[in-house]
Amino acid sequence: MGLNLTQKILKAHLVEGELVPGKPIAIRIDQTLTQDATGTMAYLQFEAMGVPKVKTKLSVSYVDHNMLQDDFKNADDHLYLQSVAAKHGIWFSRPGNGICHQVHLERFGVPGQTLLGSDSHTPTQGGIGMISIGAGGLDVALAMAGQPFFLTSPAVVNVKLTGKLKPWVSAKDVILEVLRRLTVKGGTNKVIEYSGPGVKTLSVPERATITNMGAELGATTSVFPSDDTTKKFLTAQKRGKDFKALAADPDAKYEETLEIDLGTLEPMVAQPHLPDNVAKVKDLKGIKVSQVAVGSCTNSSFRDLMTVAAMLKGKTINPGLSMAISPGSKQVYNMISKNGALADIIASGARVLESGCGPCIGMGFAPNSAGVSVRSFNRNFVGRSGTKDAQVYLASPEVCVAAALTGELTDPRKLGKKSPKINWPKTFIVDDNMIIKPPKKAGEVVRGPNIKPLPETHPMEPVLSGQVLLKVPDNITTDHIMPAGAKILPLRSNIPEISKHVFASVDATFHDRAKAAGGGFIVGGQNYGQGSSREHAALAPMALGVKAVIVKSFARIHRSNLINFGILPLVFVNEADYDKIAQGDKLTIKAGTLDNDNIIVRNESKGIEIPVKHGLAPREKDQVRAGGALGLARQTM
Ligand code: MIC
Ligand code: SF4
C-alpha cells in the first residue's frame, strides 16, 4: 500500500512506536527553532540538562517577539539568548532579521526533514515539505539535547486542491475555508496534507500561509508536497542543494479527505473572536474599520507586501483609520525597499513598523476602544491585540488594503477586475549578515537581573485536594491563561512576576485567590488551552499551586505543557459532569500512582463523585509523578 507524504517523513524519523493514528510515537528531530518569548525558558532548561552542544543538525534562536525594549528586560533577554546560543552551537538570528517562521522558510527549512519549534506556528515550514511541529520550550530543549519528540501518531487529512484562485482571492482565503469546515478544534492529533492539481498554482509563500494557519485548527502540523515550485523558491534563495522532490504515493491512503475547488473561493474574513468564525466579505455590509494591519508570520512575505504596495500605489489611507505594516523578514524589507514598493507604501500614509511580530502579539499598535481592526494575522482572540473590547477580523492582505482604502470592510473585487500581478525576482536578496553562526570558542553566558532561575518542581501527591479556583467555558486560549502583550511579555524569564498575570483578563483576582488557597484546580470546557505553545500557561499556574486541570478536551500543545510541569490533565468521562462542579467547590482526587485510568473526583461540597480519565502514556505518567519532565530528564541523561 502506498504512503502519504506525512507517513513517509514520519517513517524516516520514527524511533519508537507504530504509525497507527492515536498511538504514541517518538520521532527524531533534525532541526529546532526558538523565539525569544519562549526561548529564554527553553535555554534555561537546556542549560539545566548539562549538555554542552546541541545534537541536532541545526538549531536556530530567533529574536522577533519582544522587541519594544521599554526598559532593560527585553535587552537582557536578547543578550542572554545570544550568549547562550554561542556557547551551545546554536545559530542566532538577531533582532531586526525578522519573524522566525518567515526567516526559517527563506534560509533554513529543508524538505523532508523534521523541525520542532517553541512556537505554535512552526508548521509554516510545511510549505516546503517539512514535518514541522510546535511544542513547549522544554520539549524543544530536550530535542536540542538529542532526545526524540513524543507525540500521538496523527490521523492524516487529505485536502485535495483543484482549480485556481480567482483574482483578489488568495492563500488566506484557502485556510479560512479549511477553518470554516473543520473548526478550531477540528485538527487535534491530525496532520493536514495538501495534494491535487491546485497545489502547483500556489507559490511557496502562499503554501506557507496555509500551513502556518493550520495551527488554528489545532492540527499537529500541515504539509505540502515539495515540487518544482519548491525547487524554484529554494534556488532563488541560493539553496537549490537543499531541494528534494517529495509527494504522496499515487495510491496513498488518508483517514479523511476534503476537496476544495480553489476557483470557487471568495474573499473571506474570520470575525471576532475566533479564527473559525468565517464569513464572506460580501455578506458583511457597512462595517466601519478603525485600524488595519498587515504583517505577522502568516502574511508578510514578499508576495504579500508587493500586493499591498501595488494596491496602495498613488492612493491615501482612508482618513477614518490608521494602517501599519510589518515586513516578515529583513530580506522582504530590503527587497521592497530596493525595488521601490516600500516608497509606495510610505507615500500612502501607512505606518511602517520594524520586522517582527509586533501588533500580532500586542506589542504596540493596539486598536482604539471597541475599535474594529482588520489584520492579516492568524489569531483574533479577545484582548490579544492589547485592547480588550476591540473587534479583530482576520483577512488576506487584499481584504486588509481594501478596508484601508475605503474605511470599511470591503470585498476587494469591488476595486477592479484585475488584481495586482507580482513580478517574482529570479533570486531573492540573500544576505545573512544578521544571522550569527555559532563560534568555535564562546564567551560567558550573560544573565541580567530579568533572568530568574527556573521555579522548583515537586513530585505529585497521590491524593490531591483543594478548591476549584476557576471554572471557564469552551475554547479557552493560552492568551486567556497567560496573556502576552507589551506589559506582560517582558516577564517571560521571570516566573514569580509573570504568574501575577495568570487569567488576568478572565478574573483579575485569580492570582491572589490561588495564592491564598495554596493552589487548587481549574475546570474547563472543550479545546482548553488552544492557541500558542507558550509553556508559561502551565509553568505560571504550577508556580501558583495548580495541581490538576479538569476539562471536556485539551488542545495538544497545552496538554503536553501541563504534563511537562507536573500538572495532572484530566478529562471528564461524561461531558455533562462539567455542570456538576462549580467554582469554589472543594475537590478530592485520588490519583494514586496514575496506573489506573479510572479516577474519581470527589466533589466534597456537593457530596457527589465524578469519573475522569488522564489518558497518559507511560512516559507521561512518569513525568507527572516526578512533578514534571525536567526533573525526569535530568535523571535519565
Ligand atoms: C503566539 O502567536 O501566540 C506566539 C506569541 O507566537 C506564541 C508563542 C509565545 O507565546 O511566545 C505561539 O504561537 O506559540
Ligand atoms: Fe509572532 Fe504572531 Fe506569528 Fe506568533 S503568530 S510567531 S506572535 S507573528
Image (cartoon, rainbow, N blue to C red):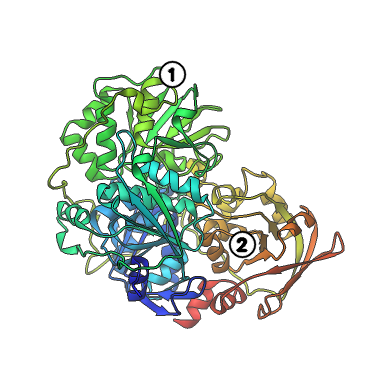
Q: Position of residue 474 (x, y in %)?
A: 64, 50
Q: Residue at x 22, y 69 (%)?
A: 440
Q: Residue at x 58, y 32 (%)?
A: 389
Question: What kind of residue is marked 2?
Answer: Met
When asked about the image quadrant of residue 463, the answer is: bottom right
When asked about the image quadrant of residue 296, the answer is: top left
- Depth check: give the residue in front, 315 or 176: 176
Q: Position of residue 27 (x, y in %)?
A: 39, 74
What residue occupies the far right of the structure in this picture?
607
When asked about the image quadrant of residue 602, the answer is: bottom right
**Residue 172 shown left or right of residue 104 in the figure:** right
- Depth check: give the residue in front, 193 or 634: 193
Which quadrant: the N terminus?
bottom left
Labelled disc at residue 542: 2
**Residue 598 shown left or right of residue 58 in the figure:** right
- The local secondary structure at tag 1 comes to loop
Question: What kind of residue is marked 1?
Answer: Gly
Disc 2 vs disc 1: which is toward the camera?
1
Q: Position of residue 57 (x, y in %)?
A: 28, 70
Crowding at dot 1, Cα within 10 Å, few <14 / some 14-19 / many 20+, comes out as: some
Spatial CA span between label 2 and label 1: 45 Å
Residue 434 versus residue 241 in the image, above or below:
above
Crowding at dot 2, Cα within 10 Å, few <14 / some 14-19 / many 20+, comes out as: many
Residue 620 versus residue 308 in the image, above or below:
below
Q: Which residue is mark 1?
A: 320
Q: Do residues under tags 2 and 1 come within 8 Å of each other at their CB atoms?
A: no
